[in-house]
Image (spheres, helix red, strand yellow):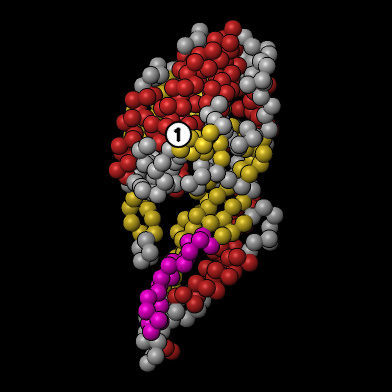
Amino acid sequence: MSEIENLSREDEAAIERLNDAGAAMIARTVEWAKTNTGSWNLDGLKDFAPILADAFSALEADVQLKAGDVFERVTDSGTSEEIETGPILRVAARPDAPVQVVMSGHYDTVFPPGTFTEITDLGNGRLNGPGLSDMKGGLNVMLEALKAFEAGSMKDTIGYQIVVTPDEEIGNFASAGALTEAAQSGALIGMTYEPCMETGAMSGGRKGSAVYDIVLHGKAAHAGRAKEEGRSAIEAAAELVVGLERLNGQRDGVTFNVGSIDGGNAVNIVPDLAVIRFGARAPDQEAAAWANNQIEALLDKALTRPGITGHLHGGFYRPPKPRNAAQQALFDAVSGAGRAIGLEMEFVDTGGVCEGNNIFAAGVPNVDTLGVRGGRIHSSEEFVETDSFSERAALSAMILNRLADGRIDGKKIKALMP
């Protein structure tokens, strides 16, 4: 950290506690990373959740593990199956306190079992390992910042709801309801612990994100003896995919990306099934509505082909989180807290999405990159900067202290939401 300034006694005490806790945060994060919690690894998620709950039981709060909602996934055969994921960690403290905050994070990673397992010391204060940055490190930052705050004299001023999810990396389909419920329990601001950028910059506005599956059915036939009797679902899908990709550039900030086409079989059979999996991003609600309308129009066109039927599954599961007056006021407040401990804060708009989108959609301004500094996330080169644990925990403690003593007016910030 740089030279600190404008600190209260509570601030100084919290910083001292968090400096002392730095090594423990790093060690716990490394230990947590040894358990694979890939989003589809149900056994790993269930094994890790009690470990997480035990750690958060150090808070003066009610700690529970709750089942998430069952959700549907389209299979490669075009049918829908019900999916169960790991439990959601719910933590609640002081619901009658005058200042309420919602805090969120996730414990799943993008790595299936066996694909990325080693923890490596890269030197120069960097560790490489699965989920160290995204976001088991961030969960430790959240936990230790709260412990430092509760060790102070202002703890009764702030109540909080924490939601730690097992499915953020696949869309929060099982936990979206829990995030909305927690956000709408009176929270004035939201605090989410995704990693910040390697430079320390944080995310500003975020686009909305959609995931779609289009299932097309045709008619199988022998490709040699009776080609004319068949109706190719893959041919219809190919035309639709070209149409989707041609939408790129037609509206500012809106992008489409086809990830895969599943279906078909032997080359002597006219394929009677195709499943198109694709995503879309949009900067605001109007752009998201335009994107959805274009997709529906392309599907309608595909269904005019003789013998082709089908349906659309999915949509914008995370609404856009554009900068508005409330968001900017919160960013300014966070910047002030950062300057007090020698951090110059920068907020950069991004196309990425996170649980902050859900919390914003629930009507709560949210800052969503309060986690550790790191980089190369979602790859086997993921790393964390170890000196960022105490630094980022101190930032959160400063935000909590300032909310508690009025230096940050949470009610005023919340009132700016449309």
| Residue 260 on the magenta span | yes
Identify whether 355 is placed above or below 12: below
Residue drawn at x 32%, y 45% as measured from the top left:
42
User: Total number of numbered labels?
Assistant: 1
Quadrant housing residue 311: bottom left
Magenta residue span: 258-278
| Residue 77 on the magenta span | no
Amino acid type, label 1: Lys
Identify whether 108 is placed above or below 145: below
Using the image as rendered, state which of residue 143 and residue 239 is in the foreground: 143
Residue receiving disc 1: 136
| Helix, strand or loop under label 1 | helix
Q: In what quadrant of the picture does the N terminus appear?
A: top right
Q: Is residue 7 visible?
A: yes
Identify whether 189 is placed above or below 267: above
Local crowd size for mark 1, using a 10 Å CA cut-off: few (<14), some (14–19), many (≥20): many
Quadrant housing residue 53: top left
In the image: residue 210, left or right of residue 233: right
Identify whether 415 is placed above or below 298: above
